[in-house]
Image: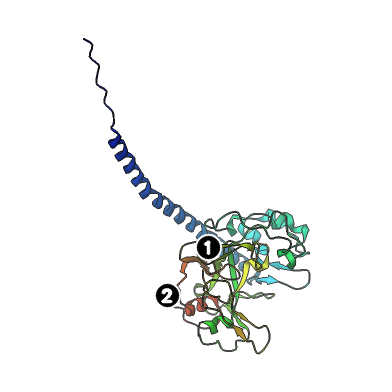
Amino acid sequence: MVTCARRSAFTIVELLVVISIIGVLVGLLLPAVQAAREAARRMQCSNNLRQLSLAFQNYESAFKTLPPSRITTGLSQHGFAAYLLPMIEQSVVYNAYQFNTPWWDSRNFQATRSSISTWICPTTPGNRTIPTASDQSRYVVIPPEGLGQSDYVVTHEVMRCFFEANSLPLPVGILRGIPGVIDRDRAVRMAAVRDGASNTMLFAETAGRPSLYYVNTQKDPNATKDGWGWADPRAIGTSLEGSSSDGRQLNDTDRNAPYASRIFGKCSINCTNHSEYYSFHTGAMQISLLDGSTRSFSQATEAAILGAIVTRDNGEIAGEF
């Protein structure tokens, strides 16, 4: 009589139990992996801001002034980023950039379409919108493939409407606004930053452009009309105004006296990347101060603190931030 050897095997129940355990472990590990990746991206974003701040310091050491946020007169229409290129190890791009013609001229395409990692936050989604012909009405033309991207800005002015929207006292002598860390069309010396380099914000995130985003990362099908890349002066310099809570309407102050304001809301962080601070880091944005240090800045930060660290010579005591 032939006897068959009994083979050991998993039962279906045992197999299902093992699969369930593996599923639970994967479910526990994935958030941890994603959190670790975001922590690494946040650190890289912070390092980018630090490198740009150090570039400002190196520029100031070389020329004894901070650069203008943008130059808008005559043919010399450029943003400060072009002048900082040698300070961030981009001499090849700098040598290709022609300062005797506006930044948007086709003769600058070789430089302006260059992607520079220092200007890009790795948390920002890819596949950015390329502006259409109708979006390009401000300029002669931009490269067909779009411009080298930018996720960071300096603030050259805190507008009257920001103070009014948040029921803050108007600074003495304010007209339409009060200066941020640097000015349009005018170089600023470090001595003018009387609030102190460690109390004055230099860079903040306005990420995702030229794609247009609103609160909770809602992506609009259109391109933003206020900044398309590191070479675009409107992309790297902004004014602090505030917006409605959904980001769809921006506060504004008239250019001429009596400087009447239109107020739609108090939101200043993460409601829209159209001319306002915006980040894809959950609940916060990254900033750098003029002394080169960086911070993670909560979107729930009080308006008084935000206004205090953006202005350079308003005499506020910002406190802890």
Q: Quadrant of residue 136?
A: bottom right
**Residue in the image at 74% along x and 66% along y:** 137
CA gap, disc 2 and disc 1: 28 Å
Q: Nearer the viewer, mark 2 or mark 1?
A: 1
Q: How has the structure been colored for display?
A: rainbow
Q: Are marks 2 and 1 in contact (CB under 8 Å)?
A: no
Does the image show residue 306? yes
From what the image shows, is residue 238 above or below residue 145?
below
User: Which quadrant would the N terminus be assigned to in this image?
Assistant: top left
- Measured as percent of width and height from the top left, residue 4 is found at 25, 16
**Residue in the image at 46% along x and 81% along y:** 317
The circle on residue 217 is 1
Q: Which residue is mark 2?
A: 320
59 or 271: nearer the viewer? 271
283 displayed left or right of 146: left
Check disc 2 and report its element: helix, strand or loop.
Answer: loop
Disc nearer the start of the sequence (2/1): 1
* Residue located farthest toward the left when viewing the structure as drawn: 1
Q: Amino acid at mark 2?
A: Glu
- Measured as percent of width and height from the top left, residue 159 is found at 59, 80
Q: Quadrant of residue 249?
A: bottom right
Does the image show residue 62? no
From what the image shows, is residue 163 above or below residue 32?
below
- Measured as percent of width and height from the top left, residue 231 is found at 68, 62
The circle on residue 203 is none
Q: Amino acid at mark 1?
A: Thr
Local crowd at mark 2 within 10 Å, few (<14), some, or many (≥20)? Answer: few
170 or 80: nearer the viewer? 170
* Residue located farthest toward the front when viewing the structure as drawn: 1
- Measured as percent of width and height from the top left, residue 102 is found at 76, 65
Local crowd at mark 1 within 10 Å, few (<14), some, or many (≥20)? Answer: some
